Image: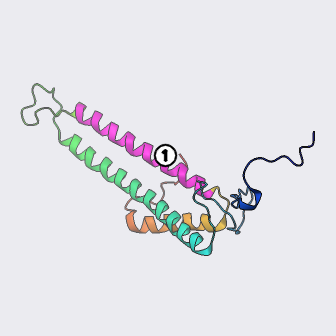
Amino acid sequence: MDHGHMHHGGDMGNMEPMCQMSMLFTWDPTDLCIIFKSWHIRSTISLIGSLIAVAALTAGYEAVRELSRRYESSSKQEIDSLPNTTEASSLLYPGRTKASAERKSKVIKAAFYAVQVFYSFFIMLLFMTYNGWVMLAVAVGAFMGYLAFGQGSAQKTVACH
């Protein structure tokens, strides 16, 4: 059976350029797809727009981290201000006890954590295009995000998880 002439559907003359997936570091943006097949770099303009989008996404990660830190701080202050009593005996804070506030805070902090984990893996996928331009855009976004939103320690890592 001759497999050399098999037709796999579609008109070969009308085929769109394929996404290039490099496993080696490169600066070549030709037919680069960023995470999704639809995020296909086809021109210098789309490359520049994509790099701006990557930087903005990465800066957004710093915003989420800062929101998480602020929530954690404010919820700790709120919990510390609540009495160590049961719900029935709390006249100043009806329906609010330390235990209920801690449960609510833990759920919200877990949601922030899940968003950060998802976001960090998404950024890792951006970096794993192995394209130098995209990698630089991630670094620029982290820099800009820290300048704009970073109130905490710069020692906290941006590890994937």
- Decide if residue 115 is in sight here: yes
Label 1: how many Cα within 10 Å (few below 14, some 14–19, many 20+): some
Q: Is residue 56 left or right of residue 27?
A: left
121 is higher (above) or lower (below) than 143? above
Which residue is nearer to you in this view: 65 or 123? 123
Residue at the disc numbered 1: 117
Q: Was residue 158 drawn as part of the magenta stretch in this picture?
A: no
- Decide if residue 159 is in sight here: no
- In the image, residue 13 lies at what x, y percent? 75, 61
44 is higher (above) or lower (below) than 130? below
What residue is at 70 percent from the left and 67 percent from the top? 30
Main secondary structure along the magenta-highlighted residues = helix
- In the image, residue 78 lies at what x, y percent? 21, 44
What residue is at 64 percent from the left and 55 percent from the top? 128
What is the quadrant of residue 90 in the picture? top left
Which residue is nearer to you in this view: 13 or 46? 13
Q: Is residue 110 left or right of residue 133?
A: left
Which residue lies most toward the right here? 1
- Residue span colored magenta: 100-127
Give the total of numbered labels: 1
- In the image, residue 139 lies at what x, y percent? 55, 65
Q: Secondary structure at mark 1?
A: helix
Indicate how the structure is coloured in the image. rainbow
- In the image, residue 65 lies at what x, y percent? 41, 54
4 is higher (above) or lower (below) than 32? above
Q: Was residue 126 drawn as part of the magenta stretch in this picture?
A: yes
What residue is at 50 percent from the left and 65 percent from the top? 53
Q: What amino acid does circle 1 point to? A: Val
Which residue is nearer to you in this view: 17 or 26? 17
